[in-house]
Amino acid sequence: MDTEHSGGAATAGLGTERIAAFSDGVIAIIITIMVLELKLPEAAAKGDVRESFVTPLAPKLAIYALSFMIVGAMWVKHHQLLAVVRRVTPQLMWIDLLLLFFMLLIPLAAGFLGEHPESARAVSFYALTMTLSSASFGMLRYRVGRMPGHYRDHIQFRRATLARSLMSTLPYAAAVPVAQFSTVAALALLVFVPAMFNIPILLHRHRQGQAAA
């Protein structure tokens, strides 16, 4: 009892700066590991450019670009989410750690898929990793939405955010079994999620910038 009380008291006055800084550091490590997984083919410096350089490297670069976009989008949304939190609770910290735990598996899944882009097992593992990461982020959103001490006027926490989290998690989850029948269809689902959410947002901001100018 004393431990729980002291733990709650220790985090009661804790702002979001420390948890944001810690999460930023972990996400930076994730991106660093992903780029370190990109290794040039052994015959890259000799032979035909297409056969010895472009063809072996292209799948790895494509998976890296997709993973970078997903991790980058999670980082941006993570900052937006923490911006409306007034204080950090132990529950919020543990859910954030769960999110980072699954996100740290992304470089492993991306490296596996980059080496075996036509493998159903590699695609399923990548999709499962994204499913767990997206579901954890949804849990974080849900927890923040139920906290009494945050600025609710800045973002819609309830049905809109939960529906958005569900809509991003379901295609990832669907890609896990779909990969056993068609890796192309599963990869299309994996690309669909970041494209569905990020491209319209970028286009909207571009139009706003043009209107302001």
Image (cartoon, grey):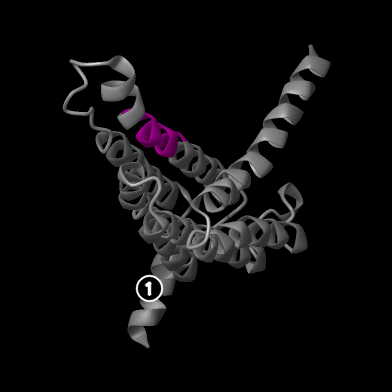
Q: Is residue 59 magenta?
A: yes
Task: Name the outermost residue toward the bottom.
Answer: 1
Residue type highlighted by circle 1? Gly
- Judged from the image, the secondary structure of the residue bearing numbered disc 1 is helix
Task: Name the outermost residue toward the top.
Answer: 213
Image quadrant where one finds the N terminus? bottom left
- Are there few (<14), some (14-19), or many (20+) residues within 10 Å of tag 1? few
Q: x%, y% of residue 128?
A: 45, 62
Q: x%, y% of residue 178?
A: 55, 61
Q: x%, y% of residue 172?
A: 55, 58
Instruction: Judge left or right: residue 152 versus residue 61.
Output: right
Stretch in magenta: 57-65
Residue drawn at x 58%, y 63% as measured from the top left: 174
The front one of 156 and 205 is: 205
The front one of 113 and 16 is: 113
Q: Picture quarter containing residue 140?
A: bottom right
Q: Is residue 5 above or below residue 71?
A: below
Image quadrant where one finds the C terminus? top right
The front one of 90 and 213 is: 213
Residue 80, visible in the rendered structure:
no
Q: Is residue 176 above or below residue 79?
A: below
Query: Residue under circle 1?
Result: 7
Q: Is residue 203 magenta?
A: no
Residue drawn at x 31%, y 49% as measured from the top left: 112
Residue 197, visible in the rendered structure:
yes
